Amino acid sequence: MAYNLDDRLVIGVASSALFDLAESDAYFREHGEEAYRRYQEERIDDALRPGVAFPFTRRLLGLNDLRPDDPLVEVIVLSRNDPNTGLRVMRSIERHKLPMTRAVFTQGRSPHKFIGALSMSLFLSGNGADVVEAIRAGFPAGHVLRSAAEYDEDDPSLVVAFDFDGVLSDDGSERVYEESGIEKYMEHEASHKDEPLAPGPLQPLLKDLNRIQKLEERRKLDDASYEPRLRIALVTARNAPAHERAIHSMREWDVNVNDAFFLGGIEKAKVLEVLRPHIFFDDQTSHLDTAVESIAGVHIPYGVAYEVAAKERVDIAVPAAVAIELADEERAGVGEVEDPERA
């Protein structure tokens, strides 16, 4: 009988997001592919160090104890590595005791085309070019940025934070802001407050996370001592009166968040440093560059915010996260050249 992915939250994760590949990548760039293969073979039983998305992934998989006979969460490796070099990735997963047994290796090519076939609600990668290709193809994907954040390994709680526009919703409102300015934007949002926005790339992910939260609520009813582990936050630059459209949209989509921060221009990093989400999704790197020292940040290169950043790079210096992502995109072209993701 086929393993059915329906009624599960399926995440695709590249080895560049799950593990710290700085040392491996540096060796590949200095010595080339053949030497790199030998390097990995010699170290096949040396576990790779956890990467930026590791704490999020481990905690998410931990929620499978809510339905142990039929796992709620499936995390699949989706990697540019070839199967031979991918062996170290799979052995590292085993050494770290992550319950992940499925993988796709597409030697030197972007694996994003398999996101839909595997019913994934999210693909995480440290390769910005692969993420851009996935978003352009209509798939939910995020570029995991370099981060110095550390989390308590003994704490099983999981905090997931989302920006709203260009992440949970489409970029319709952001386009009004870019084209007409803040005053016209506020007028537009106030006059359309009861009109829900179209869902954005990560709205299905929020729906899936809400399903898990409902199971936690049931567990709490059966066992008063149970403390729900999954908490979801909205951290947005919207403020009154624009906040109403965000709330109405989520109500119409039948999704919920536990906490909402309508910051109206206050630096998001100040809130994120206190909230400490294990992952935060935003479509603007300016909100992430100042936050990744304390949290795991993921850029969603979607819509008008990404288009504006791409245009600005021609004339001015762009934020560090954008520069890395756009350099990856230029280097990778159509995804058939040397791979910046190596394990």
Image (tube, rainbow, N blue to C red):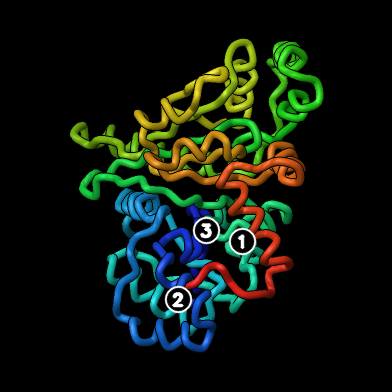
Q: x, y (%) of residue 186?
A: 70, 14
Query: How dense is the environment of label 3, judged by Cα within 10 Å: few (below 14), some, or many (20 and up)?
Result: many
Total marks in image: 3
Which residue is pictured at 56% across the width and 46% down the height? 320
Query: How dense is the environment of label 2, judged by Cα within 10 Å: few (below 14), some, or many (20 and up)?
Result: some
**Image quadrant of residue 223?**
top left
**Image quadrant of residue 158?**
top left
- Depth-wise, is mark 2 or mark 3 nearer the camera? 2
Q: x, y (%) of residue 292?
A: 44, 42
Ranked by sequence position, the earlier of labels 1 and 3 is: 1
Q: Secondary structure at mark 2?
A: helix
Q: Which residue is mark 2?
A: 27
State the residue lying farthest toward the left: 225
Is 238 situated above or below 113? above
Q: x, y (%) of residue 303?
A: 72, 40
User: Of the residues shown, which amino acid type is indicated by label 2?
Assistant: Tyr
- Depth-wise, is mark 1 or mark 2 nearer the camera? 2
Which disc is residue 126 wearing?
3
Query: How dense is the environment of label 1, judged by Cα within 10 Å: few (below 14), some, or many (20 and up)?
Result: many
Is 71 situated above or below 189? below
Say which of 3 and 51 sits in front.
Answer: 51
Cα distance in 3D space between marks 2 and 3: 17 Å
Ranked by sequence position, the earlier of labels 2 and 3 is: 2
Query: Disc 2 vs disc 3: Cβ atoms closer than 8 Å?
Result: no
Say which of 38 and 78 sits in front.
Answer: 38
User: Of the residues shown, which amino acid type is indicated by label 1?
Assistant: Ile
- Residue 67 visible? The answer is no
Q: Which residue is mark 1?
A: 115
